[in-house]
Image (cartoon, rainbow, N blue to C red):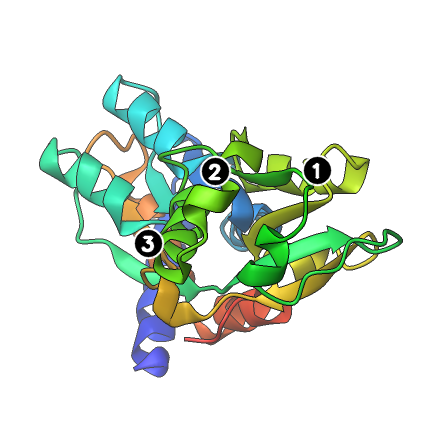
Amino acid sequence: MRTKILILLMLLVAACSNHPSEPRLRIASAASMTDAIGPTAEKYGAMTGRDVDTDFGASSTLAKQIADGAPADIYVSASRKWVDYLKDRHLLLSEPVVIARNRLVCVVAKDGDTKADGFEALAGAADLIAVGDDGVPVGDYTRQAMRKSGVFDRLRERLVGQKDVRSVVNAVESGNAPAGFVYASDAYQFAETLRVAFVVDGDLHDPIEYYAAQLKQANAPEAARSFLIYLQTDEAQDRFAKLGFVEQ
């Protein structure tokens, strides 16, 4: 299957390379994919000669901006919910595809003294906890897990909402919140300053899957289609795995 994808990609890249005057490829992606989509987009641009713009933020914020007319060719979401939000508004040109998976983890400052080996231990402490805002995928997964664990009511007053997962990282790094919930890939990428206190049982929340889809409003449809294919190649998948994402 991957061989067929690579062959098709080569054909599309050749087609895109013959039209250097075409519009820039615009990618709107979940913040937690910054270190994955960023280099992947750069590599795609180098292969095709195509200029690529990337915009990273909360999946919810990006989806709402796109629905309001913000320009984008490809949308990458950390939640099926926000892909469906655009699909329900007839804004997708292609069916969304899963390009990566992740795990939810609790992190603390690497040089701090915060200790927690699970939700019960966290509930017994008095510290603030950084989480994604309501509607932000990482926050939604976190609240799901807390509710299923039976600790949400004990923790809710200590939750400090953040606009996206990278803001959760910043809150823990700065000490504004001694603990926070992020994706395993974020913990991996910020291993110099953060350590994983515990990994959340995947049965406590919906599967964490990243979806990519081409948008009807795309100004560079051929490039968008070929980039979507490139995201599914071994080269791109290997890059994601090295950054802490779960292999497809």
Distance (Cα) linking label 1 and label 3: 30 Å
In-front residue for pair 155/184: 155
Q: Which residue is located at x 28 percent, y 48 percent?
A: 213
* Mark 1, secondary structure of its residue: loop
In-front residue for pair 212/246: 246
Identified by mark 1, the residue type is: Ala
The residue under label 1 is 177
* Mark 2, secondary structure of its residue: helix
- Depth check, mark 2 against mark 3: the one in front is 2
Q: Which residue is located at x 53 percent, y 50 percent?
A: 33
* Mark 3, secondary structure of its residue: strand
Do the residues bearing badges 1 and 3 touch, measured as CB atoms within 8 Å?
A: no
The residue under label 3 is 211
Looking at the image, is mark 2 or mark 3 earlier in the sequence? 2
Distance (Cα) linking label 2 and label 1: 14 Å
Mark seen at residue 165: none
Identified by mark 3, the residue type is: Tyr
- Depth check, mark 1 against mark 3: the one in front is 1
Residue 24 image-quadrant placement: top left
In-front residue for pair 114/211: 114
Identified by mark 2, the residue type is: Arg
Looking at the image, is mark 1 or mark 3 earlier in the sequence? 1
Q: Which residue is located at x 57 percent, y 35 percent?
A: 158
Viewed as shown, does residue 203 lie left or right of 151? Answer: left
Q: State which quarter of the image contains the C terminus.
A: bottom left
The residue under label 2 is 156
